[in-house]
Amino acid sequence: MKKGRDEDFNVIVGIGGGKTLDTAKAVAHFMSVPVITVPTTASSNAPVSALSVIYTPEGEFEEYLYLPKNPDVVLVDSRIIAEAPVRFLVAGMGDALAAKFEAEAAYRGTSEHISGGLSTVTTLTMAQACFETLLENGYEAKLAVEANAVTPAVEKVIEANILLSGKTGGLAAAHSIHNGLTRLEETKNLYHGEKVAFAVIAQMVMEDRAPEEIQEVIEFCISIGLPVTLEQMGLKDAGRDRLMVAAEAACAEKETIHNMPFPVNPEMVLDSLLGADALGREFMI
Ligand SMILES: [Zn+2]
């Protein structure tokens, strides 16, 4: 930031993963210059989103820095994405999985979301297309990237992870639960999208979604290697008290969990985490 102020740059280019791109977007915003993002992984929708996530040096979620616009140019080379470790692509699918469920919750709710307006049919449709793209192509894309191959399935999943999951439909419980989980150092080694995937299942449990619908998501997560149990989250021995730390943080005043169409309290989040874990363990067998 200091370098940006001291020298005369007329554009900022961010090349790298989510945190690098979020940093580039924030710096460009404060310098009032355009920003170009060049993602080297498809691990989240950070390349296109109009926000930067601020974490503490310990990796705990601190706040969202909402930006007035999306990046000016997003440049994606599928070959580079396919040569990155497959875990990034899989984590990106976990993040993208949230789009449909958070958009639907925000649509049913009445809160304005980050772009300043209410949800629309357009954002819901994009989120639904994102979900269908993942389910149809996710497993095949994972196998292809393991072989460092760029196939049509890989191209579609890259588009879903980066563009379709743009969260223009708003955030809701899943990302708040993710933010709460960052308070537990046991989850430190998990990527953003891996935590979000488990949080999506918890949100679905909280919403009392149909068992077949939850099962479809859990089985998809298992098929591509996203966590579905507390044990996989590094939280096998975390009791209620420990999980309550995350649940309370998930319900902090500014959290998007309050975009849910019903009031949510920490007890509900805690029970949803345990409920998601119970279902995940059932399907892992
Ligand atoms: Zn995310």
Image (tube, grey):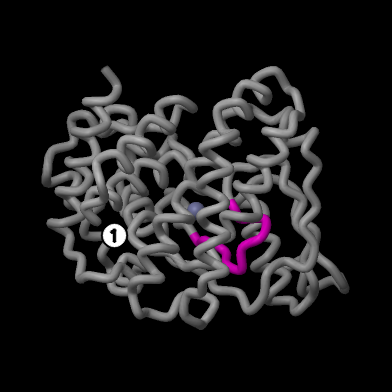
Magenta stretch prevailing secondary structure: loop
Quarter location, residue 7: bottom right
In the picture, measured across the screen, residue 117 lies left or right of residue 157, that is left
User: How many residues crowd mark 1 within 10 Å: few (<14), some (14–19), many (20+)?
Assistant: many
| CB at disc 1 and ligand 1 closer than 8 Å | no
Q: What are the residue bounds of the magenta stretch?
A: 45-54
Quadrant containing the N terminus in the rendered view? bottom right
Residue at 33% from the left image edge and 28% from the top image edge? 232
Task: Between residue 237 and residue 74, name the one nearer to us.
Answer: 74
Residue 159 magenta-drawn?
Answer: no
Residue 53 magenta-drawn?
Answer: yes
Query: How far from the left and from the top, in percent, is residue 258?
Result: 30, 71
The amino acid type found where label 1 is placed reads: Ala
Query: How far from the left and from the top, in percent, is residue 189?
Result: 44, 34
Task: Between residue 3 and residue 110, name the one nearer to us.
Answer: 110
Residue at 61% from the left image edge and 26% from the top image edge? 140
Residue at 67% from the left image edge and 23% from the top image edge? 144
Task: Between residue 162 and residue 189, name the one nearer to us.
Answer: 162
Q: Is residue 112 above or below residue 49?
A: below
Task: Between residue 200 and residue 1, name the one nearer to us.
Answer: 200
Quarter location, residue 221: top left
SS assignment at label 1 = helix
Query: How far from the left and from the top, in percent, is residue 153?
Result: 68, 33
Q: In this view, does 117 lie above or below 162?
A: below
Quadrant containing the C terminus in the rendered view? top left
Quarter location, residue 111: bottom left
Query: How far from the left and from the top, in percent, is residue 175?
Result: 40, 56
